[in-house]
Amino acid sequence: MDWADYLRDQAAKYRQLAEMAEDLSVKEELLDLAAICEETANNIEDRMPGGQPRRYRLEAEGPFPIVPAARPIGSR
């Protein structure tokens, strides 16, 4: 799962919680969080180079880019 997908999943969870919330201020806060997650996911995808998605591993230590294997120097 990449960061954009993760953030969209979180946005969906916040929307579900907002539907169940009885307190209007809690509902608004959850919907605001969902909007922030969606906007951030869109920004991540907008900044991907060359239209190819950059994948990140989601681990306890944080995101680490998955880098393609490098070719030895001088090889083509």
Image: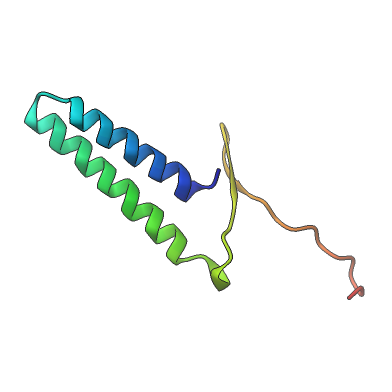
Q: Position of residue 41 (x, y in %)?
A: 40, 53
Q: Is residue 25 above or below residue 3?
A: above
Q: In the figure, is residue 70 to the left or right of 11?
A: right
Quadrant where the N terminus sits is top right
Q: Position of residue 40 (x, y in %)?
A: 36, 53
Q: Position of residue 61 (x, y in %)?
A: 58, 35
Q: In the figure, is residue 56 to the left or right of 22?
A: right
Q: In the figure, is residue 69 to the left or right of 25?
A: right
Residue at x 26% of width, y 48% of height: 35
Residue furthest out toward the left: 24
Residue at x 19% of width, y 31% of height: 19
Q: Position of residue 8 (x, y in %)?
A: 39, 45
Residue at x 20% of width, y 40% of height: 31
Q: In the figure, is residue 32 to the left or right of 8?
A: left
Residue at x 14% of width, y 38% of height: 28
Quadrant where the C terminus sits is bottom right
**Residue 26 found in image quarter:** top left
Q: Is residue 3 above or below residue 53?
A: above
